[in-house]
Amino acid sequence: MEEFNIKTSVRFGKDALSCLGEIHADKVFIVTDPYMVESGMVNQVTEPLQDRKYKVFSKVVPDPPLELVVEGVKEVIAFRPGAVIALGGGSAIDEAKAVMLFARQIGNLPEMEFIAVPTTSGTGSEVTSFAVITDKEKGVKYPLIDKGLLPDVAVLDSNLVKSLPPAIVADTGMDVLTHALEAYVSTSANAFTDALAEKAALTVLKYLIRSNQNMEDSEAREQMHVASCMAGLAFDRASLGLNHAIAHNIGGKFKVPHGRANAVLLPFVVEFNADIQGYNPKEYTKAAKKYAAIAGLAGLSGGTVRMGVKNLVREIQKMQEMMHMPAGFKECGISQEEFRMQSDAIARGALADNCMKTNPRPASEQDISEILKKAYNGGQASR
Ligand code: NAD
């Protein structure tokens, strides 16, 4: 028997943030990053709280480290809120998730409502039971996976993503595409996750370039915000794969934004998973057929599975080029020596990552090393 359920209530559209006025608690703890305070965006969350008491914890940094979780846990236990709001990108939401998980375990706290308000269109963290925390000393990112991490409410207000600069739109938007494609070919995919993943992937293929190239394009920004959440719903059930398994290990060791690491790897991982050897349609893998199906729906089919996969890979690379993204980790500023030194540890770490369990094609350490070599230099993945 299979199951598909959505615990998180998703509020979206005009005035979505007004739902914060419905919070029952008297005391609210807000987890966010310094930009949200400096830009005044945090006021959009505090205003609907009216006369409730609130405390803003605004120390979140990209890829939140363990130490910051410990700091947040102490503050939550001391404040004893009845609700927690996470405002920001995946980093702020994941920090809030991890803080709540541990504070609940050790703090003897009252029930806390959890509301996630994403300000990037990328991670889908507002609807997932994942939180990614970084151990800076070991250079590893740990995906925590627990149903208790799921927010009660996710608020999608596309006004909050208007200020995203093009580079962050590119990184986070490619993260959405990676979530959608990994969930789509995952060994745990089902009809429901497929529907969400397909819609999310097609929306990215249609709107990401517009969103990147024109900050005023509110339709594109809104579509990307919804696609990010849909991809989150898809991968929360279907999980992810090799792309994220490697990206988590790159992100722990080098200062490459999460979405950018995923984007660099994506063409090479799609090629690896599709595993197209010859021209006999009977030999095509299920993953190849699914990639080709997405290509077909996006008008990139080329008539055969082989061409469909090839055109999808080309389209991903074309999008990266149009958004001035690095094609390889070399262009991300990582020296060849440093990368080579870490490659074995990255490959071993990727094999141990939870996301590997649902990758459609088993990968060996050697396979991952080959992908890393290609992804360092970038360039044309497609044969
Ligand atoms: P982020 O939260 O790290 O933010 C990146 C930058 O964007 C920050 O400097 C932030 O201040 C800025 N920013 C955020 N919103 C903005 C806005 N509206 N306008 C201008 N600037 C804005 O980036 P992210 O990509 O959303 O999150 C990445 C993190 O999420 C990584 O740690 C990654 O591993 C994790 N992640 C989690 C999940 C999950 O399901 N929990 C899934 C994928 C990735």
Image (cartoon, helix red, strand yellow):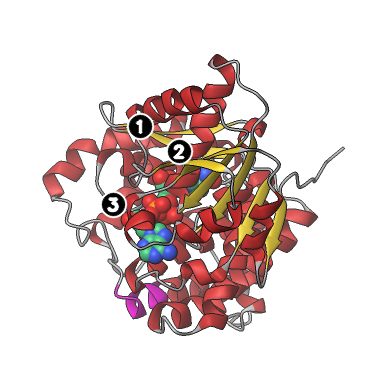
Instruction: In this rendered view, identify the residue nearer to me: 119 or 280.
Output: 119
User: What is the count of numbered marks?
Assistant: 3
Is 322 within the magenta?
yes
The x and y percentages for residue 205 are 54, 76
Amino acid type at circle 3 is Val
Give the mark, 1 or 3, whose residue is nearer the N terminus: 1
- The image quadrant of residue 66 is top left
Q: What's drawn in magenta, residue-wise?
A: 317-324
Image quarter hosting the C terminus: bottom left
Q: Can residue 157 be seen in the rendering of this structure?
A: yes
Residue that carries the numbered disc 3 in the rendered image: 256
Residue drawn at the location 62% of the way across and 61% of the way down: 17
Amino acid type at circle 1 is Leu
Q: Secondary structure at mark 3?
A: loop
Q: Is residue 361 placed above or below 192 in the rendered structure?
A: above
Tell me how far mark 1 sits from mark 2, CA to CA: 8 Å
Amino acid type at circle 2 is Glu
Q: Which mark is residue 95?
A: 2
Q: Which mark is residue 266?
A: none
Counting other residues with Cα less than 10 Å from the Cα at mark 1, is it few (<14), some (14-19), or many (20 or more)? some
Give the mark, 1 or 2, whose residue is nearer the N terminus: 1
344 with respect to 27 (left or right): left
Label 1 with label 3: CB-CB less than 8 Å: no
Instruction: In this rendered view, identify the residue nearer to me: 372 or 324.
Output: 324
Q: Can residue 275 be seen in the rendering of this structure?
A: no
The x and y percentages for residue 307 are 55, 76
